[in-house]
Image (cartoon, helix red, strand yellow):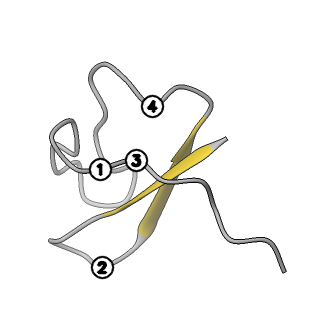
Amino acid sequence: MYVKHCPECKKKSYSSCKKGEWNCPHCDHDLSDEEAQRPEED
């Protein structure tokens, strides 16, 4: 699983794939060019 942080709404978006089109599910901002990271484990 991968996570991206939206620079517009400051919320996290998760996906199983780090490549391809990726839009924020909260504000629909295009996150395709943002760096995908592994989520931090609690």
- Left or right position of 19 against 27: right
* Spatial CA span between label 3 and label 4: 6 Å
| Kind of residue indicated by mark 1 | Glu
Dot label at residue 18: 4
* Residue assigned mark 2: 10
* Residue assigned mark 1: 35
Residue 5 lies, with reference to residue 24, above or below; the image says below
Assess whether mark 2 and mark 1 are in contact (beta carbons under 8 angstroms): no
Assess whether mark 4 and mark 3 are in contact (beta carbons under 8 angstroms): yes
Report the residue at 30% width, 79% height from top: 10
Earlier residue among tags 1 and 2: 2
Earlier residue among tags 1 and 4: 4
Earlier residue among tags 2 and 3: 2
| Kind of residue indicated by mark 3 | Ala
Assess whether mark 3 and mark 2 are in contact (beta carbons under 8 angstroms): no
Q: Residues within 10 Å of mark 1 (few under 14, many from 20)?
A: few
Dot label at residue 36: 3
